[in-house]
Image: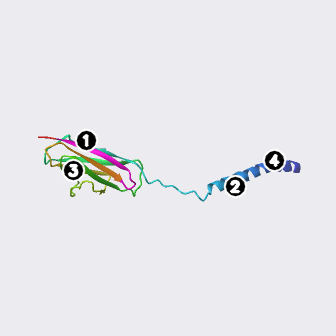
Amino acid sequence: MTIFFKQFKRGLLPAYVLLAILTSSVTLVSCSKDDKLEVQNDFPFEVQVMPIPKDVLNGQTVEIRMAIKRSGNYSDTQYFIRYFQFDGQGTLRYSNESAYLPNDLYPLPTKQFRLYYTSSSTVSQSFDVWISDSFGNEKKLTFQFNSSD
């Protein structure tokens, strides 16, 4: 019986050596000093806009419902809005706040919000709204209203 154990041990010796080599190589590769945990915090987004009227009267206010849809979720992402009117005249504001100044950057407190555009013109009006996040991602939305008599 002792001969059996000696032959059994000799047969297992190469397997033990191979197992030790594999274990040490996996340990050395997985413990590299350059490995850093990468946390993704920059997620692209889309902006959804509910349908709005095509025509607006001078002095009329149009509600624009918008929602930011993120592809991922990073809680510290901040969103901002700015606009530029290139045809006609009017004002754009968030909720009951003061009217936005063109090309100024304003923080957006929520991901779902309503903007209010008030026409001050008897001609067609066009303006761009830019929504950006704290990582430099940006979406441009163009709005056009025909003058209505």
**Are the residues tagged 3 and 1 within 8 Å (C-beta)?**
no
- Give, as a three-letter code, the residue at label 3: Tyr
Helix, strand, or loop for circle 3?
A: strand
- Give, as a three-letter code, the residue at label 1: Pro
**Can you identify the residue that label 4 sits on?**
11
Magenta segment includes 140: yes
**Can you identify the residue that label 1 sits on?**
51
Left/right placement of residue 77 relative to residue 49 reads right
Q: Residues within 10 Å of mark 1 (few under 14, many from 20)?
A: few
* In the foreground, 5 or 141: 141
Q: Residues within 10 Å of mark 3 (few under 14, many from 20)?
A: some
Disc 4 to disc 2, how far (Cα)? 21 Å
- Give, as a three-letter code, the residue at label 2: Ser
Residue drawn 76% across the image and 52% down it: 17
Earlier along the polypeptide chain: callout 3 or callout 4?
4
Q: Residues within 10 Å of mark 4 (few under 14, many from 20)?
A: few
* In the foreground, 6 or 146: 146
Could you tell me residue 140's position as x and y percent? 31, 46
Disc 4 to disc 1, how far (Cα)? 77 Å
Helix, strand, or loop for circle 1?
A: loop
Residue drawn 34% across the image and 52% down it: 132
**Are the residues tagged 2 and 3 within 8 Å (C-beta)?**
no
Earlier along the polypeptide chain: callout 2 or callout 3?
2
Q: Nearer the viewer, mark 2 or mark 3?
A: 3
Q: Which residues are the magenta region?
A: 133-146
